[in-house]
Image: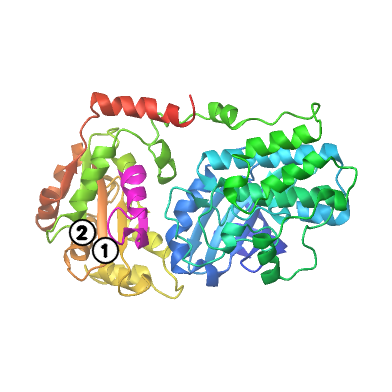
Amino acid sequence: MNVRGYALGEELGRGAYACVYQAIQPGVGREVAVKVIKAEHANRPDFIRRFESEAQIISQLEHLHIVPLYDYWREPDGAYLVMRLMRGGTLKDALKKRGFGLEEVCKLIDQVASALATAHRKGVVHRDLKPANILLDEDGNAYLSDFGIAKDVGADKNLTGTGVVIGTPGYITPEQVKSEAVSPKTDIYSLGVVMYEVLTGRHPFPDTRDVALMMKHVDEKLPGLQEIRSDLPEELDWVIQRATAKNSQERFEDVEAFVTAFHRALGDERMERFMTAREAAELANPYKGLRAFQEADADDFFGRESLTGLLLARLLEPVETKRFLAVVGPSGSGKSSVVRAGLVPALRKGAIAGSRDWFIVEMLPGAHPLEELELGLTRIAASPSIELLQVLRRDARGLFQAARMVLPGEEAQLLLVIDQFEELFTLVDDPAEAEFFLDSLREAVCDPRSPVRVVLTLRADFFDRPLMHPEFSRLVKERTEVVLPLTAEELGDAIRCPAERVGV
């Protein structure tokens, strides 16, 4: 079976939401693991809205003990995550076979906690930490995996839906059961439960069914370690009890403090020292150099707050053409960055009424813009049977009609972000194809019933090209915002603030 060129092999695991397969990565011949999220879950509107932005964040979690995400995509048949293939099985499997000595336990908590510290510094909470999501290599080293339901703490707290409980009953936290906001301390609780199980060889609440098990996490303290292992120091029990306190405010301040207390309770001075969050931060370079910022880089994007606010204001203007905005500036001026790392994250957080529920598609025109548009719309489509390219090519109202077909419901809205719009005039060989694409955009944004908004970026030296098309030129004339050079104050923020954010 082939999935987007990946040759799937044996099934490695199966759960309620996904299946994991061994596969061969095309081009490089590398063995990988492909996690296939089932269509019934991948086609839910809330999943579609957050999948790409969340996967982009997860793909940037670079750490020795985080299983790297190589690739990701979504289509109507499901969503796919391509990861490093780990051959040592899971911690869950290992716990069924044997016990762990204290030296192994200390090594395990160091490796998992250092991975969590990096994720938390990036604003990501795992939310489903459990032995099945800790993978092992052939030397017994631990790697944190399956951030598939992780979330950006800075994003909307209701992305997963009000009242929806996300997590695994055996390791879920009281705040998750009660549908309260999560935080890094959520992962501290789950890590405490995992370490209890590693230390004792058994779950703290064995032989308990799901609903009752979740309520035990809300109401009952974990049994004392000494009830099972009398050789463990009492101070270690205090550490586990604090990590799993029912009130998150009573837990350790951060994962570093938890691990430090864990080692101290064991009188452990010989083990590998846990890298502190500050040291990890100092190893991370928050500057992008000449690379454009992406949505996942929003936390390190400074100096363009005023411009971002101006773009939002333009989208709110009470004019007929408010569904269109061209962001124009010289090469290297930061127009792509302000849209991707400034405007789009602000919209996802609800900067405009209802915008947190918009479906956002990003694309480049390329040599065949309608085909690129079809690929973009396919990423948010729930039905595999729609012939989108045929609809897009039918007439100039194709984008309007295709958007209606892929969006779930009459009230749903689409924001189409077209970066490097100059490609329409440099890469498209057929002028009629470029003209048709322009007409499609104009029809989609000018119809008052349209669910489509378009924000494009255009290099200043190509500003005259769309003006040569009479109908489209009116849009560009009325709805263009120019990216000006950074002021001295903005430049200072762009230099200083990323360093301050990582504690330098």
Residue 298's spot in the image, x, y percent?
Answer: 40, 41
The relative height of residue 188 versus residue 300 in the rendered view (above or below) is below
Tell which of 226 and 127 is nearer to you. 226
Q: Position of residue 309 (x, y in %)?
A: 24, 44
Q: Residues within 10 Å of mark 1 (few under 14, many from 20)?
A: many
Would you say the residues marked 2 and 1 are in contact, meaning their CB atoms lie under 8 Å apart? yes
Q: In the image, is residue 54 part of the stretch drawn in magenta?
A: no
**Element class at badge 1:** strand
Q: Which mark is residue 323?
A: 2
- Give the residue drawn at x 78%, y 57%: 204
At 67% from the left and 40% from the top, the residue drawn is: 113
* Mark 2 vs mark 1, CA separation in Å: 7 Å
Badge 2 element: loop
| Numbered marks: total | 2
Magenta span: 339-361
Q: Badge 1 is on which residue? A: 452
Query: On the image, which quarter does residue 9 sit in?
Result: bottom right
Which amino acid, by three-letter code, is at mark 1?
A: Val
Q: Position of residue 157 (x, y in %)?
A: 45, 56
Q: Quadrant of residue 5?
A: bottom right
Looking at the image, is mark 2 or mark 1 earlier in the sequence? 2
Q: How is the image coloured?
A: rainbow
Quadrant of the drawing holding the N terminus: bottom right
* Three-letter code, disc 2: Arg
